[in-house]
Amino acid sequence: MVIRILILLLLAFPAFGAEVAGVKLPDTDHQLLLNGAGLRKRAFFDVYALGLYLAEKKTTAADAIGAAGPKRVAIHMLRDVGADQFGSALTDGMKDNISEAEMKAFEPRIKQLSSTMSAMIEAKKGMRITLDWVPAAGTQVTVDGKPAGAPIPGEDFYRALLKIWLGERPVQADLKKALLGEQQ
């Protein structure tokens, strides 16, 4: 009887893999495992909590970026940021981690991502934005669980997005470590 109650309690309350700046990130999200989670700061402001979800845990950036199958970057906004500013930050992060030739090749897809972000008008505090790699469809942006814009084709594009946080020049070095599961 006690075992049944414990099992029911475990099923009733989701297991949280991490808490970042008050945001609870579950161990799993759409059958993906939380690889790591961290806090994006800008100057002395907390901007967003971020969780990286993969099919299986990876401890190196190259393995995480190159992992086969679906992937998810879950962004939980901790302050209001203009959508254009948010989109520009993503583009700048890509630019810092890929070649000029790759940026040029990605230009139509970057414009598609920028357009999707601009349609939000503002990334508001409390908003949940996900960037999903869906193998049959492409990169799908969702805002608070609702698809935003059409999927963006090409796994190469999603890998370039991951380099914002996991590349050679990540947006924040301690965030990269956190996403790879390193304790801080």
Image (cartoon, helix red, strand yellow):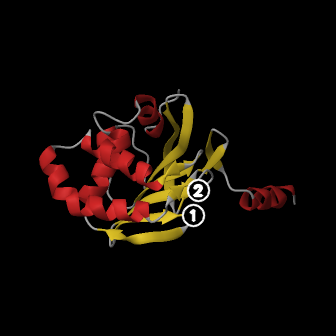
**Which residue is more in the foreground, 2 or 88?**
88
Say left or right for 154 vs 27.
left
Q: Residues within 10 Å of mark 1 (few under 14, many from 20)?
A: few
Residue 101: x and y in percent read: 12, 49
Residue 106: x and y in percent read: 21, 57
Say left or right for 52 vs 24.
left
Say left or right for 65 vs 173.
left
The residue under label 1 is: 144
**Which residue is more in the foreground, 182 or 163?**
163
Residue plotted at (38% across, 41% down): 165
Q: CA distance from mark 2 to mark 1?
A: 6 Å
Q: Does the CB distance between marks 2 and 1 fall below 8 Å?
A: yes
Residue 134 seen in the current view: yes
Residue 124: x and y in percent read: 58, 54
Residue 31: x and y in percent read: 51, 62
**Which residue is more in the foreground, 159 or 113?**
113
Q: Residues within 10 Å of mark 2 (few under 14, many from 20)?
A: some
Residue plotted at (29% across, 41% down): 62
In this view, 79 is above or below 124: above
Q: Earlier in the sequence, mark 2 or mark 1?
A: 2
At label 2, which amino acid type do we have? Answer: Met
Q: Residue furthest left?
A: 101
Residue plotted at (63% across, 38% down): 21
The residue under label 2 is: 127
Q: Residue furthest right?
A: 1
In this view, 150 is above or below 31: below
Write down the quadrant of residue 127 in the picture: bottom right
